[in-house]
């Protein structure tokens, strides 16, 4: 049974308020499919009954479960491959030269889903950084359920088959029942926390690299602009921002400049010349 227009409007409004994600008409089937397990867990006989009860008696925990269920969590290891190649081959060597004094890099995986992205980043950094260098990855997601999963670092055989080379699986994971668990050596460099990119961000030290991939596509233009401005304040002046293949800062936030790296593009804070100077020596 397809959701009624009223139920869909209620869900779309809730998700928009809580996450800024826009659910457009035509996604009723998706919403119902995602909410069916939530409704069953709540003891409702159907999604319509679950939503009806929620509208009559608002429940913050149930609201959170709805938003969690409708947050897109499509992910894989080394997703799209090229950003990780660019990170290891171009970005890290440049940053190693620039950070010789601290011998340390900070990276933010800003929509980490179930953890494949930050652990892929950790593997890339372990491979690319010289001996004696340290790295720290902050991994955040709006979904509390995804943060729990990512922090546990446990994956099924089906999940590790999605993009994780066999040699990396053997080196960075250990058997855990029928599945796999990340090794402490990989897990220790990643810190997970729940975070809503559209809300005021907590105090965080600046980052050398930020992966904000496949997130902006779910926001309207004003929300994209707001998120990009907040992210730029947390990116070092010579840092790097990676977006999804279908995303760009162009026409949204001109405080970034696009830089080609091999077959992809990344973004860096735009260098501005102070007013009253010519920019010439």
Image: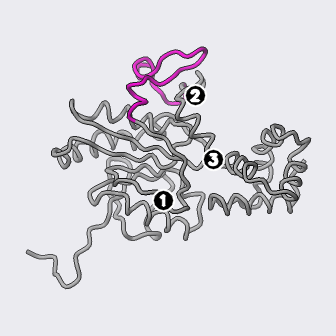
Query: Sequence order check: which comes first, mark 2 or mark 1?
Result: 2
Query: Sequence order check: which comes first, mark 2 or mark 3?
Result: 3
Q: Which residue is mark 3?
A: 72
Query: Sequence order check: which comes first, mark 3 or mark 1?
Result: 3
| Residue at 24% over, 47% down | 95
Q: Which of the 4 image quadrants contains residue 132?
A: top left
Q: Residues within 10 Å of mark 2 (few under 14, many from 20)?
A: some
Instruction: Give the residues drawn in magenta, as a range.
Output: 161-189
The reply to whether discs 3 and 1 touch (Cβ–Cβ < 8 Å) is: no
Residue 201's disc number: 1
| Residue 168 within the segment the image draws in magenta | yes
The reply to whether discs 2 and 3 touch (Cβ–Cβ < 8 Å) is: no
Marks 3 and 1, Cα distance to the nearest angstrom? 21 Å
Marks 2 and 3, Cα distance to the nearest angstrom? 16 Å
Using the image as rendered, state which of residue 74 and residue 14 is in the foreground: 14
Q: Which residue is mark 2?
A: 159
Disc 1 secondary structure class: loop
Marks 2 and 1, Cα distance to the nearest angstrom? 31 Å
**Looking at the picture, does residue 272 appear above or below residue 212?**
below
Q: Which of the 4 image quadrants contains residue 239?
A: bottom left
At which x and y percent is residue 145?
63, 40
């Amino acid at each position: 049974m397809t959701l009624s227009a009223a139920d869909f409007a209620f869900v779309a409004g809730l998700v928009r308020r809580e996450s800024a994600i826009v659910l457009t008409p035509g996604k009723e089937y998706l919403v119902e499919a995602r909410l069916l397990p939530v409704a069953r867990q709540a003891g409702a006989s159907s999604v319509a009954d679950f939503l009806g009860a929620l509208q009559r008696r608002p429940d913050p925990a149930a609201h959170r479960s709805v938003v969690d269920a409708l947050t897109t969590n499509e992910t894989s290891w080394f997703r799209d491959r090229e950003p990780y190649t660019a990170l290891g081959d171009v970005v890290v060597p440049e940053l190693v030269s620039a950070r010789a004094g601290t011998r340390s890099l900070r990276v933010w995986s800003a929509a980490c889903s179930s953890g494949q992205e930050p652990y892929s980043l950790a593997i890339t950094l372990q491979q690319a950084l010289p001996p004696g260098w340290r790295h720290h990855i902050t991994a955040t997601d709006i979904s509390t359920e995804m943060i729990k999963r990512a922090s546990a670092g446990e994956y099924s055989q089906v999940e590790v088959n999605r993009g994780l080379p066999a040699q990396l699986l053997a080196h960075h994971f250990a058997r855990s029942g029928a599945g796999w668990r990340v090794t402490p050596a990989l897990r220790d460099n990643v810190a997970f926390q729940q975070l809503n990119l559209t809300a005021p961000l907590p105090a965080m030290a600046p980052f050398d690299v930020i992966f904000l991939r496949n997130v902006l596509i779910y926001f309207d233009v004003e929300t994209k602009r707001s998120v990009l401005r907040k992210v730029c304040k947390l990116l070092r002046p010579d840092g790097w921002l990676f977006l999804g293949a279908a995303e760009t800062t162009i026409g949204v936030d001109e405080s970034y400049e696009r830089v080609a790296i091999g077959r992809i593009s990344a973004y860096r804070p735009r260098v501005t010349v102070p007013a009253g100077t010519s920019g010439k020596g």
